[in-house]
Image (cartoon, rainbow, N blue to C red):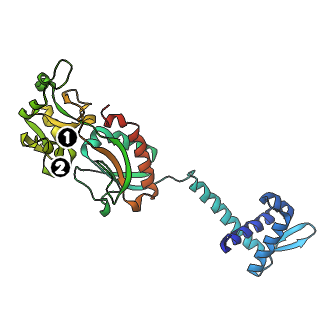
Amino acid sequence: MNEQGEYWRDLRTVLAVAQTGSLSAAARQLGISHATVFRHVNQIEVKLEVKLFERNREGYSLTPAGEEITELASKFDRDLVVLERKLLGQEIQPRGLVRITTTDTLLINFLSPIFADLQKCYPDIELEINCSNELVNLNRRDAEIAIRPSKASPDNMVGRKISNLSVGIYGTVKDHSNLLDDAGKLRNFALLKSLNWIGPDESLAHLHIYKWLQRHELYPRVRTRHNSLLAVADAVRNGGGVAILPCFMAAIDPTLLALKRPLEDFDNEVWILTHPDLRNVGRIRVCMDFLNKAISEKREVLEGS
């Protein structure tokens, strides 16, 4: 035990003797031997170069110096009990601002009720949601937490893969039912190359959807481009053409028809990320754990099952 630890140990022994009036009673209270109590009291008197107790037949009574020391030790002991309760989470709740960035599709179609549950559970946490399809730089502290489609965690971030992310090709029941056979399967993939497509513009070139369209030589068929997948879905809904959309987004819209779902060669995931310097900050860790659990419980929605 270091010197500070010994000092506090001896102070607690003095406090116990002052409260009980004898070495034997203090020993029982502290769960140590009579001789150990005697030694601790002597040690602190030597350190302080002052007499703390008068020894007499009735027991141990405090000197004026002992009364002063005991009052200070008693206050410190009470403060320590309060601190211990707080550390055990009995009186402390995480608080402060947590900035989260995510995409508009994840927010509006999936995350909003989860964020509401988070604030109900931790009312002292304030959430600031950056709804953007652009990549936000966590290194610059534009946000503390990112929930995003990604293939892997960036090298300079820490986090967890929460789920796979499934997408499909969608049109409308009104305009595209004739492309499906009696079993509800796409008659011929080549038919898709004759259709008008709606897709993300170059500001969303980092998205797997954009890359998939390029890889399959379908991007030249994209006649309408948007910087938001919400806008893409709305354009499909209103008869503008077909598009690749996340399955979780299309599943809640009865006007959308799955022409091919899921796309087998579309490989994407949903990650929750933060900066390494922030992972042990209390409010960040609490939010990360809550969101990871809540999203994982609804993983089948993201995976299109």
Q: Residue at x 77, y 60 (%)?
A: 30
For this view, does 53 lie left or right of residue 70? right
Q: Residue at x 66, y 66 (%)?
A: 76
Q: Quick one: quadrant of the C terminus? A: top left
**Disc 1: which residue:** 230
Q: Position of residue 241 (x, y in %)?
A: 10, 33
Considering only vertical position in the picture, is 247 above or below 206?
above
Residue 21 is drawn in which quadrant?
bottom right
For this view, does 214 lie left or right of residue 271? left
**Disc 2: which residue:** 204
Q: Position of residue 107 (x, y in %)?
A: 29, 43
Q: Quick one: quadrant of the N terminus? A: bottom right
Which badge, 2 or 1, is on the more N-terminal residue?
2
Secondary structure at numbered mark 2: helix
What is the C-alpha distance between the residues marked 2 and 1? 13 Å
Considering only vertical position in the picture, is 109 above or below 98?
above
Secondary structure at numbered mark 1: helix
Q: Nearer the viewer, mark 2 or mark 1?
A: 2
Residue 54 is drawn in which quadrant?
bottom right
Amino acid under disc 1: Leu
Q: Report the number of numbered marks.
A: 2
In depth, the one of 152 and 257 nearer the eye is 152
Q: Which residue extends farthest bottom? A: 49
Amino acid under disc 2: Leu
